[in-house]
Amino acid sequence: MGPWVPYQIFAVGWVGVAAGLAGHWSRDSRIPGWRDVIVLATVGGLMGWIVGALLDVTDWIPVYRGNPSLGWLPGMDPATALVHFARFYLLTSLAYDSFRAVGNVLMVAMLGAPVLAALVRLRLRLTFEVLGAAP
């Protein structure tokens, strides 16, 4: 535990946001299909890189501050900062985050269908309708 935990929670929270948005593209049925698993696996792969990049900001600014080709400097224009961060990310984190992204895709491909089926069943069991009182 440390001061970086809220930022990590913020970054990982975007995975839930992206998965929720991906759920809107799914078809409404009682049994999730392969299309649903493919969409979720795609989101998982992309989020492997996005979360890695978000978490890298906490290292990039304090550790590489002042480095002329990779670091951040106060007053730096946004385009230069983006170029420096892209270099930093490519050199330090892309390979590691690629393992995370591929792992996410493999896990969703293997476990996505049964987990989605269980969640659909849970939703059906916990859904209720409130009817008005009879006159």
Image (cartoon, rainbow, N blue to C red):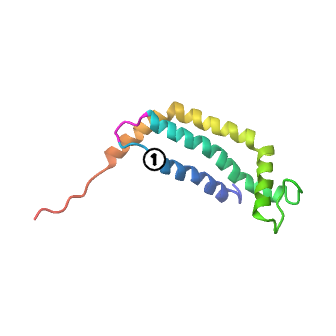
Closest to the observer: 128 or 79?
A: 79
Q: Nearer the viewer, residue 57 or 122?
A: 57
Q: Amino acid under label 1?
A: Gly
**Farthest top residue?**
110
Residue furthest left in the image? 135
Q: Residue at x 53, y 53 (%)?
A: 17
In the rendered image of this protein, does residue 48 appear above or below residue 114? below
Which of the 4 quarters of the picture holds residue 26? top left
22 horizontally vs 61: left or right: left
Residue 53, percent from left and from top: 70, 50
**Residue 9, percent from left and from top:** 62, 55
| 52 vs 126, nearest the viewer | 52
Rendered residue at 16%/63% (across/down): 133
Q: Secondary structure at mark 1?
A: helix
User: So how many labels did they put on this image?
Assistant: 1
Q: Give the residue at mark 1.
A: 23
Residue 123 appears left or right of 38: left
Q: Which residues are magenta?
A: 29-33
Q: Quadrant of the C terminus?
A: bottom left
**Picture coordinates of residue 123, whole percent (x, y):** 36, 46
Closer-to-camera residue (71/77): 77
In the rendered image, the residue lying farthest to the bottom is: 75
Q: Residues within 10 Å of mark 1 (few under 14, many from 20)?
A: some
Residue appearing at x 58%, y 36% in the figure: 105
Dominant SS type (magenta):
loop
Q: Residue furthest front?
A: 79
Q: Is residue 119 left or right of residue 18?
A: left
**Image quadrant occupied by the N terminus:** bottom right
Is 128 one of the magenta-colored residues? no
